[in-house]
Image (tube, coloured by chain):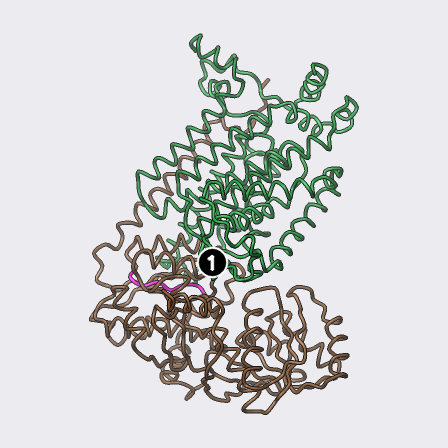
Amino acid sequence: MSMSLRLLRDRIPGASTVLMLVVMLLLIAAVTEALGSTVLSRFAIRMFIDMTLVLGLQMFMGNSNILWFPHVGFMGIGAYASVIFSMSPLQKILSLPELYPFLADVNLPFLPALLAGALVAAAVAAVIGLPLMRLSDFPAVIAGFAMLIVIHAVLTHWEALTNGPQTLFGVERRTYVMNSAIWACVFVAVAYWFKESKSGLQLRASRDDLVSTSSIGVNIVAVRWFALVLSAFAAGIAGGLFAHFITSFSPKAFFLRETFIILAMLVIGGPATVTGAVLGTVIVTIVYQTLRWVENTLNIEQVFAQPIAGLTDITLAVMLIGMLILRPAGIFERREIGWQALRALWPWTGADAAPEPAADPQVVRKAAETKQRR
Amino acid sequence: MMRENIFDWTNGRTFIAGAAAAILLAAGLGGAGTANAASHEIFIGGALSLTGIQAPLDEPGLRGARLAVQAINARGGVLGRNLKFINLDGKSDPVTVGNNAAQLIAEGAELIIAPCDFDFGGPASREAQKAGLVGISTCASSPLYGSVALGDMQFTLAMWNTQMGGAAAEYAFNERGWKTAYVVTDTFIDYTTSLSEFFIKHFENIGGKVIFEDKYTQGAGDFSAQLARMQRKLAEEPADVFFISSYMPDLGMIIRTIRLAGIDLPVVGGDSYDDTGLFDALGEKFGDDIYFATHGYMAPGSAPGMEEFLALHEQVYPDEPLTSFVATGWDVVQIMAQAVEIAGTTDGAAVAKVMEDNVFNFLTGSMDWSSAETGHEPDKSVALIELQDGKTTFLGWTRPTDVPKPDYLIKYLERQESD
């Protein structure tokens, strides 16, 4: 490796991780665009939206180790809020007849509407996060699950804002391959930055050892809260992208099915790493679409007397179980993709590659150091 | 020392597996694009769900569609071309449904059959519209399913909830003389909410009185609070009939709870009652004095072509068609075939025009759609069915008059006029 690259690597820690992931995502987007197939673009858009969502989940769940259910609830809030900001007043008369008058005339362009929608999701998370972030372990998981149900119930019954259980239709298509890919890239950088930031480090320390982290004076509630707000913001963006992709949806789009899929993506990839979140999404998407193709081909060619169904869901579930047995911390347990890891691929440079940090007792110590430095 | 790990990404095997999967995927997509370019058959694409919550609604329609393709091909196809029908499992996921439709269109589909629901069917119809093709949903009864929300080549085979609720209201008020109704609405999904809304509107329009509307949510599993309220309200002011808008499994529980409490007023409902699960759940003991509006009745003589359908069904499937949802799939294909025959082409605009201008008459009664400017509102005959001693009887066809229009359509039409 040349000297200047070495310097760059030392100066910006993790730059290579972010760079590699971003290049990979943009490459996928560019190839998809070049091929120009509607079907492939739709797969890619769905993947980038899921990736944004999974990266958001990684920021909170991956760094805090709290199994977090309400994430798709925040996605739902972002979806509805962005639509309320972006829909034209004329369309609102048809689609949201009971909307409050002060919101009826709001009509922002797509990007500000998307950001505003995500801010609403982050604001809701900020409020409900205050009491919830005091909880750890099972109580946190149960409270989070209850939160998902509460959000779902509110979306289903607040007719003025969401049209109730009825489908909200007439949203303009604004999400395409490139803008969804760019948002996924943005959150790759944000998630990596957060993980390596001071709060991120403190949060990871609390994940590895809650008691000693609080003993060194880290305000665990505050760092968790910050991570939650960031994560809800990402979920809100994903929701806005989803709304302007599917163009008609109802609250049931943001419930258990989607929760299961994104949890599978993160758990299979590895919740503790950004690489895990990104590649988990890519792998699950490829497996899902391939199996769907296999299933469809078998049915069209009538290989079996009866059409087979449900192959994809079973396989996804088996993959998840297998992963939890064989490698509970996911494919990318602790180490991110990057120059170092890449060099380990080549046998002649692999010797000086850093070994996989098994548990990482370092994190608590590092958090303590940053604490002292302040 | 580095921990040995078969899943480490630095290990070549995972990488190879991933690459293989990617190649498989690419091959699938590439192969898909060229498969049917020069086919002589008329290719109908379906995106109905075989798995997930939508499967029970889509599966019967799929059966019916397959039978219709068989029947039409047996008599020589359409315009001298045979029909080919391929359905890709929509997996009860709106995005997958849209992907399927896009894929089928890329493979050369000329007509699209969409799932039986606005949320799940909409994405398929939207892809069809984008490609300039006619899309028909098998049995979506949401009043949104039409040209305003989806485009001028999109239709639903089912009556809208406006007409279903209207038919139930007219049957109760005009035919049976039940003047006061007690309504129970399941607020979990759009279908049940809007069905109640239109029943109440029409019942009041024709002179009836709704004494109370109570809410229930699917999945709660307990109707005792609502029952207590019901007993109190009915003691204050008696009602002639119940209108209960819910669906299985809780619909069975609600009716049992009411009957067990000794309240034996007649019950009226919509097409969610057309479910063998309900008949089984109520049995002979509770399956009494129930009347519902649905798409058709699966017995000889109820509609033109029923005998042919039943004979073919008996050949292919071991069991009898017990609900009229099978007929909706059959009718979608029959109407597509007839409309293409009249239009002389599968061109979306031409076929849509034929569908707007003609009246069709198949298993689900006579049906007609309004123009694209007025929303493709279906005007259909409604089948009325009676459940006594756990057995169904066909009461006949009806066609409610002046049913309420959905709010969005009223506003849309007003806007058209003022423009």
Report the front residue among B307 and B200: B200
Task: Name the quarter where the N terminus of chain B is drawn.
Answer: top right
Q: Compared with residue B253, is residue A128 higher up or lower down, i.e. above or below?
A: above
Hey, which residue is sitting farthest front in the picture? Answer: B418
Residue B148: x and y in percent read 40, 64
| Location of residue B345 with respect to B301 vertically, above or below | above
Report whether A134 appears left or right of B67.
right
Give the residues drawn in magenta, as a range: B110-115
Position in image of residue A311 (x %, y %): 48, 52
Residue at 55% x, 73% y: name it: B195
| Residue at the spot of label 1 | A169
Q: For residue B73, which quarter of the picture?
A: bottom left
Chain of the residue on which disc 1 is drawn: A
- Three-letter amino acid code of the residue under disc 1: Phe
Q: Which chain is green?
A: A
B112 is within the stretch colored magenta: yes
Q: Which quadrant holds residue A218?
A: top right
